Image (cartoon, grey):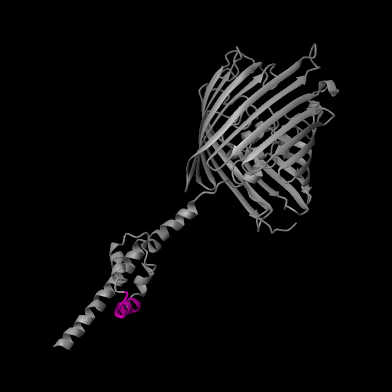
């Protein structure tokens, strides 16, 4: 009797162990992120008889299936592992794809962590682009749907395919003689507004110039960088003046400053730059003119620049402009301009500031008056949330003193503030909500309102409140081997 009882008793654990293993396998197949208390209890039961050898034999003979569920004994290995892997894949990168392309020539942009060309496996070529779609509500509801004075978000009161850009570029490889190349095509209301003031030399009899010729070109340049940091680039290039660029997904705020709408977004001509000890750079620009692809006279303008970048977090820049920007090309009629900018940016927060002052001796007017302007802005951004998704806020107050109306056509001081929420849903998707307030000190008003849509006409508004909602899809892909 006792041998039979003992034999039956020895079969009981085997019979019980087999269904337990099957149920563990089924529960694991149904729900990977474990809601499996039964296997968890059994895992504790199996290791407890570790000293005796018989306990290890059932685990090895009848537990190939249970061993894969809680095999690492720690439940976190079987349970959280499947849940953590998707979380890591969903984690957004620090910088938007294409940040390097947007910030080239404009290190003060400081939009995030840039591609480090010193790292192994650096790929010099990049293709990318973005589509920015927005809807804006303006408290003045102008009949022409125009947000006066800006070239980057020129439409209001409607859904707008604001700006679409596609580009290809090649960066330099440090320590090697490298070619530089950049071409970007664009379309949308912002593309038209950016070139709206392009001159057509010769007027009605002129050819091969003007907005219709240039509006689909965002950048087109070629050059090289030497082993010792000397750059020579010619063509249509991003202007380094001001904080921010006209590729709006890469700015802290959605809309740009009045300052950025008063300086060149792009320059056409020759750039010479020399980097010194990786921290200093001096620049010489010889260009057609102040945001001009075709020149409005027969002489170029000159800009000198200096940047100091002691780390990837801080940048200081100074740019000085000298040159003829009217028909009179005598030195006494040259435009003089200075732009000073500084930014400090980390993953959690950033702050920036700029100050500009400029003057034009208007020899074309009686008594040749000096028309002057001055402006300043403070930029701030801070991270609200930022693990799997990121949510940043940005606040920017500014003023623009246009004493003689040289920049915006009306003697006034513009005061503005913008508050922006930036949410990175995915690496390639950015959703933004911005409130902006603008005030003009002009007694006759400045902003379009209802049927009052003529510059200098009656009924213009002195204030406006605008809400922007924007969705931007951004793409960038690096390719090419590390070859000079």
| In the rendered image, the vertical position of residue 294 relative to residue 459, given as above or below | below
Decide if residue 73 is on the left or right side of residue 255. left
Do we see residue 454 in this rendering? Answer: no
Residue 365 is situated, as x and y percent measured from the top left of the image, at 79, 14
- Snapshot quadrant of residue 352: top right
The residue under the point 73% across, 32% down is 319
Residue furthest to the front in view is: 51
Decide if residue 355 is on the left or right side of residue 143. right
| In the rendered image, the vertical position of residue 87 relative to residue 102, given as above or below | below
Q: Nearer the viewer, residue 484 or 199?
A: 484
Q: Confirm whether the magenta stretch covers residue 51.
A: yes
Residue 168 is situated, as x and y percent measured from the top left of the image, at 68, 48
- Snapshot quadrant of residue 354: top right
Residue furthest to the left in view is: 1
Q: Confirm whether the magenta stretch covers residue 123.
A: no
Do we see residue 312 in this rendering? Answer: yes
The residue under the point 58% across, 32% down is 379
- Snapshot quadrant of residue 146: top right
The residue under the point 81% across, 26% down is 324
Quadrant of the image containing the C terminus: bottom right
Residue 189 is situated, as x and y percent measured from the top left of the image, at 62, 33
Decide if residue 143 is on the left or right side of residue 50. right
| In the rendered image, the vertical position of residue 90 relative to residue 400, given as above or below | below
Magenta part of the chain: 50-61
Count of all numbered marks drawn on residues in the image: 0
Quadrant of the image containing the N terminus: bottom left
Would you say the magenta stretch is mainly helix, strand or loop? helix
Decide if residue 388 is on the left or right side of residue 331. left
């Amino acid at each position: 009797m006792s041998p039979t009882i003992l034999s039956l008793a020895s079969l009981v654990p085997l019979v019980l162990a087999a269904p337990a293993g099957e149920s563990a396998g089924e529960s694991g197949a149904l729900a990977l992120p474990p809601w499996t208390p039964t296997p968890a209890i059994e895992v504790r039961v199996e290791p407890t008889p570790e000293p005796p050898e018989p306990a290890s034999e059932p685990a090895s003979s009848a537990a190939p299936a249970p061993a894969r569920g809680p095999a690492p004994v720690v439940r976190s290995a079987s349970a959280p592992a499947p849940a953590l892997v998707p979380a890591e894949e969903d984690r957004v990168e620090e910088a938007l794809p294409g940040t390097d392309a947007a910030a080239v020539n404009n290190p003060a942009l400081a939009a995030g962590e840039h591609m480090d060309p010193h790292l192994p496996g650096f790929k010099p070529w990049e293709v990318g682009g973005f589509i920015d779609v927005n809807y804006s509500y303006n408290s003045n509801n102008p009949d022409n749907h125009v947000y006066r004075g800006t070239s980057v978000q020129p439409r209001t009161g409607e859904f707008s395919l604001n700006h679409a850009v596609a580009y290809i570029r090649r960066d330099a490889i440090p320590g090697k003689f490298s070619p530089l190349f950049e071409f970007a095509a664009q379309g949308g209301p912002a593309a038209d507004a950016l070139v709206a003031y392009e001159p057509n030399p010769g007027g009605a009899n002129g050819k091969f110039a003007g907005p219709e010729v240039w509006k689909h070109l965002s950048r087109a340049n070629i050059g090289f960088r030497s082993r010792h940091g000397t750059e020579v680039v010619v063509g249509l290039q991003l202007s380094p003046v001001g904080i921010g660029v006209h590729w709006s997904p890469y700015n802290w705020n959605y809309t740009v400053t009045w300052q950025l709408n008063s300086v060149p977004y792009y320059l056409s001509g020759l750039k010479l730059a020399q980097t010194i000890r990786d921290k200093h750079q001096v620049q010489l620009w010889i260009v057609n003119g102040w945001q001009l692809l075709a020149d409005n006279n027969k002489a170029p303008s000159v800009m000198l620049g200096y940047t100091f970048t002691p780390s990837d977090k801080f940048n200081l820049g100074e740019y000085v402009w000298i040159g003829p920007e009217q028909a009179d090309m005598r030195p006494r009629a040259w435009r003089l301009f200075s732009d000073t900018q500084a930014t400090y940016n980390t993953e959690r927060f950033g702050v920036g500031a700029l100050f500009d002052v400029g003057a034009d001796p208007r020899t074309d007017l009686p008594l040749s008056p000096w028309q002057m302007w001055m402006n300043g802005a403070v930029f701030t951004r801070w991270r609200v949330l930022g693990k799997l998704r990121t949510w940043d806020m940005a606040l920017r107050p500014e003023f623009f003193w246009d004493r003689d109306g040289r920049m915006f056509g009306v003697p006034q001081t513009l005061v503005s503030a913008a508050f922006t929420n930036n949410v990175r849903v995915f690496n390639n998707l950015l959703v933004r909500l911005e409130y902006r307030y603008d005030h003009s000190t002009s007694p006759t008003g400045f902003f379009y309102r209802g049927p009052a849509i003529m510059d200098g006409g009656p009924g213009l508004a002195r204030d406006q409140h605008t809400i922007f909602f924007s969705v931007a899809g951004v793409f960038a892909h690096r390719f090419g081997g590390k070859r000079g």
